[in-house]
Amino acid sequence: MKTKNYLLFIILFSLFLVGCNESVVEDTYTSKKPDAAEALRLNNQANIFQWEGNIFSTNIEWIDELEINEDKYIGDIQFNATKAEDFKDGTANHLPIGAKIYSAKERDDILIVKYDNVVKRYLVQSEG
């Protein structure tokens, strides 16, 4: 009888330990830089361009309120595209070909674009 009680105790204790075992499931999320398809999916009227593999967008109120000065000329818009799959470096959907792109002295995540007496600031779209 003692062995039955002892065996029953061992089984119940084992079930208790297994029931209390915390199983940890780790969700792994990988993020990547947004591309033109994602930017246009979120806002099909977004004013964007691609430079050095990054998507830059404008019409961001807090960016326009910053005191930012242009630094170095880094290139021109070379292509126009309306479809996301046609984007590559130097491609814009609203900027004219030949628009001049400058870095900003104060921030690495903002580029300044000039064309026809218009100046626009573009913020890099970061990983989500």
Image (cartoon, grey):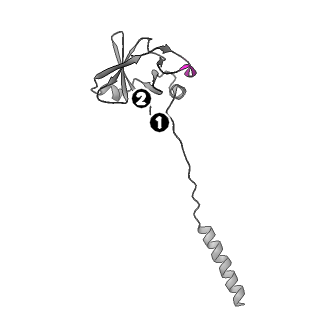
Task: Give the farthest residue toward the bottom.
Answer: 1
Toward the viewer: 120 or 80?
80
Q: Report the quarter where the N terminus lies.
A: bottom right
* Residue 66 picture quarter: top left
Does the magenta-highlighted stretch encompass residue 86? Answer: yes
Q: Residue at image x 37%, y 30%?
A: 109
Asked if residue 90 is among those painted magenta in the image, a careful observer would answer no
Q: Position of residue 9 (x, y in %)?
A: 66, 81
Is residue 71 shown left or right of residue 79? left
Disc marking residue 127:
1
Residue at 67%, 85% in the rendered image: 6
Amino acid type, label 1: Glu
Using the image as rendered, state which of residue 59 and residue 109 is in the foreground: 109
Q: CA distance from mark 2 to mark 1?
A: 10 Å
Q: Is residue 49 left or right of residue 6?
A: left
SS category of the residue bearing label 1:
loop
Residue drawn 65% across the image and 72% down it: 15
Vertical arrangement, residue 109 with respect to residue 119, above or below: below
Q: Amino acid at mark 2?
A: Val
Q: Residue at x 68, y 77 (%)?
A: 11
Residue annotated with mark 2: 124
Range covered by the magenta-colored residues: 82-88
13 above or below 119? below
Image quadrant where residue 5 sits: bottom right
